[in-house]
Amino acid sequence: MSAPVRRDGTFDDAALMRRAVDRATHSRLLAPPNPWVGAVLVTADGVSFEGSTRRPGDNHAERQVIERAGPQAEGATLYVTLEPCHHHGRTPPCTSAVLDAGISRVVYAVDDPDPRVAGRGAAALRDAGVVVVAGCEQELVEEQLAPYLHHRRTGRPFVVLKLAATLDGRTAAPDGSSKWITGPEARADVQQLRAESDAIAVGAGTARTDDPRLTVRDVVGPDGHPVREPKRVVFGRAPRGAAVHPCLELEGPPEAALDELGRRDVLQVLIEGGADVAGRFHRAGLVDRYVFYYAPALMGGGDGRAMFAGPGAPNMDDLRRGTIRSVTRLGADIRVEVDFRGG
């Protein structure tokens, strides 16, 4: 495939980085706990090779495109969504592959905050005479790699809170029944959200009442193989014989639970309820993203189960206001993604 060029004959860095970002989407369900990274290598005469990081232990995106290019990699430009690694992990450092291939220019989007990299990759390349350009399409990749970057910067997983409700904000009937509020398209979307998460968590009350399995169904990876199963987590003690077993049981404050999940290489945790857990994480300001699934249905009264248990904002001035990231129609339902950080 030929690379896009500007009118002055130089490569269009932004367009090529966006192509690398697109390749990284193929890695989302495969790479964790490694970052899902895309790369494009463009030879001196404009021929391009594309790749993305695969399952842990396989080649990173950089090595994939370098191997595909072969001798043509000499003098080429490498576009990669994350700063090339400069340490021995499951695979050798990508900086060594770049230098061995004779690549003359590296363009990347985001500095890797992993303390084993943290600027060392870029510095090693520059010291060896490679032209390095950082920050190309940075905002786009910061969003794509948000769970990984958050984990490396804080030591905790990126927290996604998922709630399915009627239009009047009720998650269950007064008798506790809640299946099914939303339709099949929304439920399929939840399975994709589960597959993108490293752990799925519920409270002990939900584990007792709903007896969920917290598994991924009907999702396969881009390589055609089943996706990995996320860790199953219960905040509190799961009942003996519950379908969620074997699971990790975490007690104590939410902050301690997130610290423990972070130590276990959980980059993203999906919290699926119940209202008590949702309320505690919300009030503590620990939710990084809210995903609401609304069905065109009304409970029509005040006795249905609310999304959040516990005290809310005492007055209008104390409302937590956020930013709607997206609204998507899924069959008869809608999905609304909201960020409240800083809101």
Image: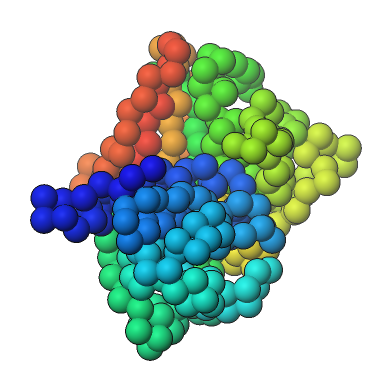
Looking at the picture, tell me which residue is in the foreground, 283 or 40. Answer: 40
104, above or below 7, in the image: below
Looking at the picture, tell me which residue is in the foreground, 55 or 314. Answer: 55
308, above or below 166, in the image: below
The structure residue drawn at horizontal position 37% and vertical position 59%, both measured from the top left corner, is 43
Looking at the picture, tell me which residue is in the foreground, 263 or 128. Answer: 128
Q: Position of residue 243 (x, y in %)?
A: 81, 34
Q: Position of residue 69 (x, y in %)?
A: 49, 57
Q: Position of residue 313 (x, y in %)?
A: 33, 45
| Quadrant holding the N terminus | top left
317, above or below 170, in the image: below
The structure residue drawn at horizontal position 45% and vertical position 64%, both measured from the top left corner, is 73
Q: Position of residue 138 (x, y in %)?
A: 29, 59
Q: State the colouring used for the structure image.
A: rainbow
Horizontally, residue 123 falls left or right of residue 178, namely: left
The structure residue drawn at horizontal position 33% and vertical position 70%, both measured from the top left corner, is 105
